Image (cartoon, rainbow, N blue to C red):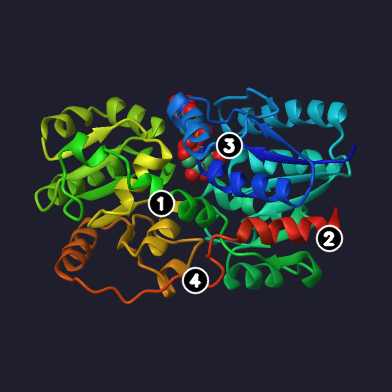
Amino acid sequence: MSFIAVIAAARPNFMKVDPLLRALDAAGLPSELVHTGQHYDQNMSEVFFHDLDIKAPDVDLGVGSGTHAVQTAGVMVEFEKYCFERKPSWVVVAGDVNSTVACALVASKLGIKIAHLEAGLRSFDWGMPEEINRVVTDRLSDVLLTPSPDGDENLRNEGVPENRIFRVGNIMIDTLLRLLPRAKESSIHQTLDIEPGKYLLGTLHRPSNVDSEESLTRLVEILQQASSWHPFVLPVHPRTKQKLEQYGLRTQLDANDRIHLLDPLGYLDFLALSSQARAVLTDSGGIQEETTVLGIPCLTLRENTERPITVTEGTNTIVGSDEKLILSTLEDVLATDSLNASVPELWDGKTGERCAQVLKEKF
Ligand code: UD1
């Protein structure tokens, strides 16, 4: 029987594939969920299956971490075996992680049709591994499911035929809107003893921010200063944890009782925090989108974004890496109560259904 293989790999994929799997089921399209194992810790993977109530993966390729080549090649070898054995007729890959491009490469050479969920995003920054993954995956895909008009435009500029581009909206927002009522039941604010609306929330994991000692030291100084204005909650990504320890920066953060260093959080606790933060500081992609929908000010600690609509329409400000600029922008944000922002078109909780409709026509 022909079916669609849906790939999940790393933390930012889980909230994207879940609404798709539900919509495929509802549309009567058979699917299998393949977890590549790129993220494998309880708090980077399993907790999301629990919080989102995602069906258990039909197969776990168990690839794990490694250099880019080791990780990408590992996924390719294991996914090719899976394709030989199971023979999917379509593969859906999401986002921009190494597993996304690895599975797209395998599928394209085996003549399996590919749909890319979250297609067309571009930072135009080739120093980001994710940008390479995005461009290559889009080039190999038969169906490009985009979240916003800038995505359509980027694909057209790269010569992608119009009949491959389908604007479906932002699928992460399906999960956010479905689970926001449950996130409100989280007791994380009491556990941390912080008041809704009166704390800052941060996440950091981009290699460009955390891999070098100079830049991580600068970010720690920013956290220290920001925490004097509001308590600062920082769930720490494994990559960042390693680097904080390696550069001897962890002790000073632990010593500051206004900074809450946490292990990575599950979806519901994180959403409980992001939906009620005074402001969020992040280098993540998805969090720029979630804060836009939640109406929470977001400062993006990067030089660019592949999600410009969060700036032009949403609550996002790109602040780069200059310490003075970051702190003065944060001060301005904290001094203002009103936000001039709106939710982009089709970020409405129904993207999964639109994806399933497109796939049903093609399948
Ligand atoms: C990956 C994605 C990035 C995404 C991010 C979200 C790529 C190129 N990068 O980056 O786009 O925004 O996930 O988290 O695909 N580790 C653990 N436990 C885990 C997973 C990772 O300890 O469950 C450690 C690894 O050993 C490694 C580090 O974290 O040292 C980085 O993991 P990796 O998967 O290489 O990339 P991320 O930085 O997580």
Q: Which is nearer the eye, 45 or 245?
A: 45
Residue beneath label 3, please? 54
Whole-Å distance between the Cαs marked 1 and 3? Answer: 16 Å
Q: In which quarter of the image is residue 246?
A: top left
- Amino acid under label 1? Leu
Q: Nearer the viewer, mark 4 or mark 2?
A: 2
Q: Which is nearer the eye, 248 or 297?
A: 297
Disc nearer the start of the sequence (4/1): 1
In-image side of 330 versus 77 (left or right): left
Q: Residues within 10 Å of mark 2 (few under 14, many from 20)?
A: few
Q: Where is residue 115 in the image (x, y as percent from the top left)?
A: 74, 52
Q: Position of residue 279 (x, y in %)?
A: 25, 57
The label shown at residue 344 is 4
Disc nearer the start of the sequence (3/4): 3
Is residue 169 among the parts visible in the rendering?
Answer: yes
- Amino acid under label 3? Ile
Q: Residues within 10 Å of mark 4 (few under 14, many from 20)?
A: many
Vertical placement of residue 193 versus 320, above or below: above
Kindly state the secondary structure of the residue where label 4 is placed: loop
Residue beneath label 1, please? 180
Whole-Å distance between the Cαs marked 2 and 3? Answer: 25 Å
Whole-Å distance between the Cαs marked 4 and 2? Answer: 26 Å
Q: Residue at x 64, y 55 (%)?
A: 352
Q: Residue at x 41, y 51 (%)?
A: 180
Residue beneath label 2, please? 361
Q: Residues within 10 Å of mark 1 (few under 14, many from 20)?
A: some
Kindly state the secondary structure of the residue where label 1 is placed: helix
Work out which residue is located at the far top of the displayed protein and give it. 62
